[in-house]
Every structure is written in C-alpha cells, then in structure tokens.
Amino acid sequence: MDRFPAIVGDENISTQEDNLKQHSGSEWSSYPTLPGDKPFAIVMPGSTEEVSEVMKVCHRRRIPVTGYSGGTSLEGHFAATRGGICIDFSRMDKILNLHKEDLDVVVQPAVGWEFLNEELAEHNLFFPPDPGPGAMIGGMVGTGCSGTNAYRYGTMRDYVLSLTVVLADGTIVKTKQRPRKSSAGYDLTRTFIGSEGTLGLVTEATLKIIPLPQNTSVAVSTFPTVRDAANCVFRVVGAGVPIAAIEILDDVQMQCINAVGSTSRTWAEKPTLFFKFAGTPSAVKEHISLVQSLAKTTGSKTFEFARTQEEATELWSARKEALWSVMARKRAPSDHVWTTDVAVPISRLPEIIESTKSDIARSGLVGSIVGHVGDGNFHAIILYNDSEHATAEGVVHRMVRQAIEMEGTATGEHGVGLVKRDYLEHELGREGVDLMRKLKKAFDPLCLLNCDKIVRAQRPKPGEVQEW
Amino acid sequence: MDRFPAIVGDENISTQEDNLKQHSGSEWSSYPTLPGDKPFAIVMPGSTEEVSEVMKVCHRRRIPVTGYSGGTSLEGHFAATRGGICIDFSRMDKILNLHKEDLDVVVQPAVGWEFLNEELAEHNLFFPPDPGPGAMIGGMVGTGCSGTNAYRYGTMRDYVLSLTVVLADGTIVKTKQRPRKSSAGYDLTRTFIGSEGTLGLVTEATLKIIPLPQNTSVAVSTFPTVRDAANCVFRVVGAGVPIAAIEILDDVQMQCINAVGSTSRTWAEKPTLFFKFAGTPSAVKEHISLVQSLAKTTGSKTFEFARTQEEATELWSARKEALWSVMARKRAPSDHVWTTDVAVPISRLPEIIESTKSDIARSGLVGSIVGHVGDGNFHAIILYNDSEHATAEGVVHRMVRQAIEMEGTATGEHGVGLVKRDYLEHELGREGVDLMRKLKKAFDPLCLLNCDKIVRAQRPKPGEVQEW
C-alpha cells in the first residue's frame, strides 16, 4: 500500500467506504455483492506507465486487482471478491489521436462511447458499438460488448484494431500497430477482447471508425404474436436487406413504456419491431419499402416510418426507454432489476422468447423481453425484490439452459462475470473450459487479475456448482 | 508409425517420396524448402476422432505434426522443418450441415471456398472470404485469410462462428456453439484463427454465410499515377460508399496482363482501380455514379462500368488474371514468383507503393503491385531466378520494414509462416512476441504442432536473425 502514493500521488488513492462499495457493485448488477466484496483501496493511475508500476507492486506483493471504467457491467464483473485494489481508470479519459484519413482513433480506457461519438460526429465519423449508457472503452473491450448496431456493423470485436495492455506482472504489451487488417501472428487483440479484465488491463485502444451514415430513418411495426414478428425478421435478414438495426420489444415492454409515459406518445401494446435504416437517401427509401412489404406478408398490423429526423427520434424513443421504463416500475426502492441476455441461432428465437415469456408469467414477476433480434440475441428484464430472488434466478436459469440446449450461448453481449461462469462447461464442455483455464494461467499465473471471473481458477468441487 | 495404420487404415498413409515433398512446399511459396524439410509420412484421417487418436500417438511419442489442406499458403507454413508426420485433411472434405435460416454452414477442413460458394449459390447464399484459388477452410482458418471481398464483408476472422479443434495431446475442443454473437468467455475461436496450425488442428468449422447479393457490377478506372488512384480510394472510402471491393493494379501489372493476352481485350497500361458493387439494383446504380464522380475529381483518365453481367465478368477478368499473368512471364521454368503482402494505415499507401515500385525498378527484377487498397493491404509479385534470390529478398525486406515503420504490419493476409517470423519483434516489440510464445506454450507445451512457425520456440540467439 505504501508504494502506491509514490506512483500515482496521494490524491489519486481513495479508501473512503462508500467509494470502495461503489467500486465493487451496482444496483443494476445481477450479482448480489456480499459484504466482504470490496477492495481495500482505489488507485487511479494517469498513464500506461503508472498502471505498469502499480501492477509491478501488486505482482511482487500478490495483491489482487480489479479494473474499473464505466462500472455498467451486469454480471458481477468488478465485484472485488478477493479484496485487493481496484484500478479506476477515470483519469485516463482522453481521445489521444484521431486519424481521419485512416479511419481510426486512439483512446484511453475511460472514454465513453457516447462522448466519443459526439466528438467523432463533428468530423462526420462514427463508432458503432452502442452498449448501455455510461459504458466506457476499457469495459467495452472487457465484455466484448455490442448493442443495437451490431446487426449491421458488428460488435466491439470488430472495432478494435489494437490494444495497449498491462499484464499481471506489469509488462506493457501492444497487440498490433494500426493497419486495418493483419495476419501477423496470434490474434492477441481478440484474446484480450471479452477477457473481462482477467488477462490484462487495457490502457489504450486503437478503434476502427467509419463514415457517419448520411441518412438514417426508423420504422416501427406491430405484430399479433412474437412468432409473427420473428418471421418478419427471418424474411428481412434472409433477403439481405442491409438495415442498420432490427430490435424487438414484447407486449409487456410496450406496456411498461406506456405506463411510465416517458415518451411523447402511446404505443400499441403488442410485440413490436423497431427498424433503423442508414445509407444514401435512395437506399434508405428502398430499404424501408422492402421491409414494409416483408412485414405485410408476415402479418404486421401496423407499419409506421419516419418522414423527418424528429419523427425518427420519436419512433426510436420507445426502444431507448426500454430498460428505464422497467426500472421505473419498481414497487419499492429496494426492488431490483435483473437484466440478462442469451443468444441462439436465429431460427430458434421465437420458441425461446415464447417459452421465456410464459415462464415469467408463471413466476408472477414483471419481466419484459427486448431483443437484438437480427443477431438472435435478446434480453429479459425482470423486476424482483429480495424475497423473490430465487424465483428470478429460476427464470434466468431456465432461459440460459434453454439457450444452451438450442446450440446458443449463455450470453450474447453482457459477458460471464461471476453469474454465468458455471454455464460455460455446459456450453463448451469441460475441455473448452479447461483450455480457457490454461490460457488464463499462461497470462496470469498468480491469478491476480479479476481472479475467478469467467472461469474458476480451479475446477469446481462436487456440489459447488448448481444442478443443471 | 506402427499405430497410424490401425487408426486410419493402410490405404490412408503415404510414404511416397514425391508425395512427401509436395506436402512440404510448393513452387509458389516464398520459403525455399530445404532438402531435409519433409515429413516421414502423410497420414489422412477421416474424422475428428481419428485426428484425435493420431495426435495422441504423436503426443506420446513426441512426433512433430504439420497440418495440410489446400497447400496454397506462401510463407513456408507447411514446410516440415522438424520432419514428423503431415496430417492431410483431404478425406475430410464434406459440407456437413447447411442451416439456411440461421445463415451458417458446418464444414470439414478440406472444403474449398470456391466449391462451398458453388453449393451455397444454389440456395442464394454466399461465403465472402476469397483468398487464392484452391485454398481450403482449414488453411483459411490457419492464416486468417481474406481477399478482395474483405473491404466490404470482412476477413476470415469475421466468418467463423465456431471451430472443432484437436489439441496437441489429442483433446477435442469445440470453441463455441452456433449463436451469431457471443460474449461467453475467452475468444478461443479467434485465438485459433491465424494460428497457422501451431495451436491445434481444425477438424470442423461453423461458418457465417450471408444472402447472395441480388445485383453486382464492376467498374474500372485508370489514373495517371498510383497517388491519384490512391486519392480516389481515400475519397470513396471516406465518403462511406458501400462498395463490394476496391482493387488496384499498377502499370507493370497491366502490362503483364496485356503481354500474356489471357483476357479478351487490351488494357491501358496505367495504374488502374477495379471496383465491385453489390446490392439492390438502384443501390448499385447509385454507388457507381458516386464513385464515377469521385474518380473524376481525383483525376481519372477513364471510367468504364459494366452494363451487363458479361461486361462485368470481362472487366473483372484482368483482376482475376493478375497473379497468373506474372507467372506466365517466367523466362525459364526454373524461375520463381515471390508473392508477398503488407498492410499499412491507408493514408500511407501511396508512399509505400511508390517507393516499392521504385525499389523493384532499381533491382532490375520484374515485379507488379496488386492491392486490396480499401484495406491498406497490397501485394508485390516478383519474378526471380535462383541467382536473383538475394535481390528479391532485399526488395521484400525493404517493403516489409517500411510497412512496419509506417505503423503497418508485415502481413495483411498471407500470415507469418517461417519467412516473416523475425519481423514480429519489430512490429510488436519483444514483449508481444514473448506473450505469443507463452500462448503457444500453454496450448502446445511440447511444441509438436508446426513448431517454430509464427514465433520461434526459443528467443533467437545473437546473430541468428537478419539485421533490421
């Protein structure tokens, strides 16, 4: 502990109780933070070199480390289950270098994606990954996040050209230079993406950016059933219409939005598809008309599209308010929201959404479905109080199990953290998890970095893991 | 050796001298195969289980292993520098499962991308990565290849959903199930992509596929200089015109094509851009007209676009013939062709292409430039005979060094193999290469799989590596 002030300065270390707690969990996390889950100090380095020096101390003294940027992750990613220190990147929040001609930008880990896009927009440029509000590049690399733009533009895995990473022993590694394409050796960049702070700490990222689409529009279409809506999605995806986003909100979700009244209109309380379009003016027009006719043949009841930018913003507002509208329906301040996600091959989507909806209804909880349906990825957003925790957990468990049984995954974009760790063996087999454990051990043999996240450091003992 | 027939059958083992030689190198490889570089046997398993059994024997007996599918790689990837056996996947050449609705296909490693696309086209589906003719999925995963379609559609790294891999000790690992998107743990899939057979042997791949574009077209435009052509590319890329491909062929390359006369017309011997367009009919029209006007403002001398499918095929034929037209200019059967590739941030492209052209001219060799210019990636194709080897090597060395000094990479799509191994330290630093070595060691501690490719098993001794 005595060494850290010499590295980062006294003013960049905090041991204040509230701060420690806030750096180990959040009210929107589905991992119930335990009383012991907190770091003994928060250390705020200002540069890659300072991170490296801090890690050298931790390595020498065997101090566990958890990285922290936006703190918006959902599965217990930054719970300090081993104590130790939290490295908070908030001072490393600069856009270091915008290479407009090369279409890349070099940023520090505490740059938020929303701020980045505001800056880029001034140059008519765009960084597509759009996870939850508040998320920052460091954590976005950590979870391999995505969002509504992934269907058209890809996920975080497709937008990182290079990373500067500090390893567990303080070694600084740069995974690539700045070419847009490379076959030069093992893909260290992508090995770190999605590694949830367990293999190294990202201190700099070179991100791919793209020209801002000249024109965008939005359309909203309602369907009698989730299955009809999903059929529409299959047709649109199968026809290769290059839409920018395709999202589903179920009837419960639309009810929540109406009940909260945070948008300027009242919506039909039906399964609803939200489409975003982007491209040249004539391409956008053409795509809207193609989607409209496909929606019609699959039983859409309504189809509205925006004629102005204001109308587009209004139509999209319901999608934007989804999570908040469920949170606003808390019966008491102590209620929680469990936001979980899975992904399945898209043909299986109607079946799993329908059975999850029935399961939620049977449970007596309020829970909505919101999906990045073009990717086969959807969320359940479930309200529960402390006494309903096991009920909520049961719903989530059955949803994840069904996704895995459908050749899907326990998480499409939120990551594993602590909550989904023991599903990996069902999804990938013991051999796959053992290989992940080897990878972890090669990079961090002392298990200092976010130890026991993604995979347990040791194979679990009999009885340690919940029944399948 | 005695165990292999029991696993795969006598008829699936070859020790025939010519065959052994052919499985260790090719006439188009830039690695000069040495007399000792050959396996003692070629083993042809028919299933993942047989590969696993073969690897268990190799593991027990410490037998080195090199994987082989299409044999089209260029940098000595399958040279059997340690002897041992070659596992030839030619019997594993089936398309196992086409999931049309999910837009994925499960294939064995010896499926060629051209054959796959013929089969997919019958269902109006398309697999974009288009490396050299003859390349097969196993090797395509190995090199993390790409091709002309990468600018629009991405590389092999973007089209593999999941792999079944046999590790060095025979363990069978599946890296994912079939969701199109997943954040479930370390990205094992992408760890194997680009690993050139050094971490495991791919026995099955689940590939992303997309709907076949309804309409495609081609345009060809000539420019006074490479720099003018490159400026046109910047403008097109910067404007975000979603073209399907954008390729450059230099004046020497166009001369070769004319000299060989393998296309149905005579081309202007000028730096030439080849554009491919894909999309709905009106989008294609719009994109052509956008590109035409951008080409004009950057000084194009001619701009032709196809009005029919036949014209499109004719215009694209020059691009298709590039490599063969240089090979056809061999002065003697003993002449060689050295095809190398680098990638740089796209703003640096004109400078490195110009200096490489001057360097080739100074060297007295015939060498053309062909580039996937939208990705900042280009090839030099150089003719040389045995006495000119050092001269050719010098040109390639200076081109690679310049690319690395421009924050680029030693290889954009061909991979490292043996030839580019010692450039990695210049590109990534010793720390990056050391981390790659750790990764290799974690996956293959005995260094049985294609040992010494990508990274040397041990750090090189002083004097072992060429001067920078």
Image (tube, coloured by chain):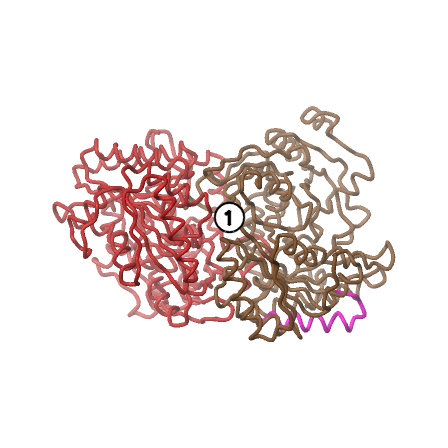
Chain colours: A red, B brown
Give x and y (percent) for residue A468. Answer: 35, 29
Q: Residue type at mark 1: give it.
A: Ala
| Quarter location, residue A465 | top left
Principal secondary structure, stretch drawn in magenta: helix
Foreground pick, A462 / A133: A133
Q: Which residue does the image show at 59% across and 29% down from the upper left?
A: B49
Q: Chain of mark 1?
A: A
Give x and y (percent) for residue B368. Answer: 73, 64
Residue A89 counted in the magenta span = no
| Quarter location, residue B260 | bottom right
Q: In the figure, is residue B310 to the left or right of A72? A: right
Foreground pick, B390 / B237: B237
Furthest-front residue in view? Answer: B307
Determine which residue is flagged by label 1: A442
Q: In the figure, is residue B424 to the left or right of A228? A: right
What is the quadrant of the N terminus of chain B in the image?
top right
Give x and y (percent) for residue B227. Answer: 62, 74
Q: Which residue does the image show at 53% across and 39% down from the upper left?
A: B206
What is the quadrant of the C terminus of chain B in the image?
bottom right
Give x and y (percent) for residue A429. Answer: 46, 34
Residue range of the region highlighted in magenta in the rendering: B348-367
Residue B359 counted in the magenta span = yes
